[in-house]
Image (cartoon, rainbow, N blue to C red):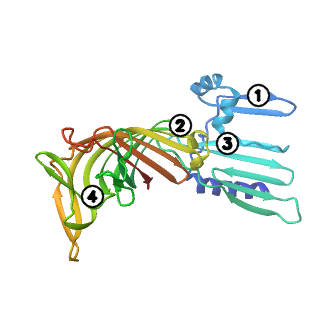
Amino acid sequence: MKKYVLAMLLMALVELAFGSPVLPDPRPVNDSIIVEFGNSGKMVFVVDNPDDFERLKNMDINQIIRELNIPDTKNNGELTVIEIRQKDGHKEIVSIYEDVGETEVTVGRYKLIVDETGNRTKVKLETSPKEEKDPSFRTYFNTDIGINSYFESGTIPGAGAAYGPKGWGSWNVGFHWMASQRLSKGAYWDFGLGVSWYNFKLDNPRYQVIGSENGIQFVNRTDVNGFKSKISASYLNALTMFKVDFGKINDTGRNGLRIGIGPYAGYRLGGRSKFVYRELNGSGRKKEKEPAGSYLNNFRYGIRGEVGFKSITFFTTYDFNPLFHQSLSPELHPVSFGIVF
């Protein structure tokens, strides 16, 4: 009676985990190979295809164990492993472990345990977490939120400079559609398109950025009470990155370090300067906006790096070309850093 019950439960588990299995043809098999080892070890191979027999001769025992995903056991019971294969080539491993008074049937993520060691038979169904598959190709969307600054001759301009940047308020926002190609286990090549916005807020709000035929000028507006001054620009970007995920390499999931690096290039979509002030006699809030096309570079190119751990990923970018036209001064190279969502 027990075997009938187990057979019914086994078929239900296979149907749940695998769908309708393809049962072997009723024709007789051509050959079987029995390998005996140790005191009681025995492995039986049933081969009904000459090609499979040739492949079996080229396999070692460790490769066979890996392909069948045979679970480790320290008990003295009998373990039977069955491979069920569908027409599309997909397969599922069914393992049946039998010991005195206890039977375990494992199909994929599901394990059925029948315990008859006590006065009453106990049946328990366990489910392991679903294994996350790593697709060979995928697409995704990410968002950058960070802050901007820039380097002049290898250093960030100080607060005393007319164009010294203010960290808080110099926001960087980017949206990118990305595609990722898996090269090997834990190694990926990502590429994508997106848009980003530069905002550079001046630390000294009294200076207004004005473009002219003589170049860019940072004018000290002593005639008004300035309290906000910034430059902004938007870009259409293309980027590519080589990424390594040590969590995937070491089979630790998201608990491993992730790094990535690659170049990018962008074309400027727009840009302007904004100066917000009040009159010295106490007037209301006023704004002056100037187009920035006459002094901002139309193209940008540089390098991007990413470092991540668990659910957090940080990014940084550095532009190799200056923010302003080379014929204009100063020569400032934008740098950004922040978080990727």
Q: Nearer the viewer, residue 327 or 35?
A: 327
The residues tagged by marks 1 and 2 sit, at their Cα atoms, a distance apart of 33 Å
Q: Is residue 75 above or below residue 280?
A: above
The x, y position of residue 157, in whole percent, is: 35, 47
Mark 3 falls on what kind of element? Answer: strand
User: Label 1 neighbourhood size at 10 Å, few (<14), some (14-19), many (20+)?
Assistant: few
> Is residue 86 visible in this depiction of the protein?
no
User: In the image, what residue type sits under mark 2?
Assistant: Lys
The C terminus lies in quadrant = bottom left
What residue did someone put label 3 on? 82
Of tags 3 and 4, the one toward the viewer is: 4
Of tags 4 and 1, the one toward the viewer is: 4
What residue did someone put label 1 on? 35
Mark 2 falls on what kind of element? Answer: loop
Residue 34: quarter of image: top right
Mark 1 falls on what kind of element? Answer: strand
Residue 212 as seen in the image, left or right of residue 310: left
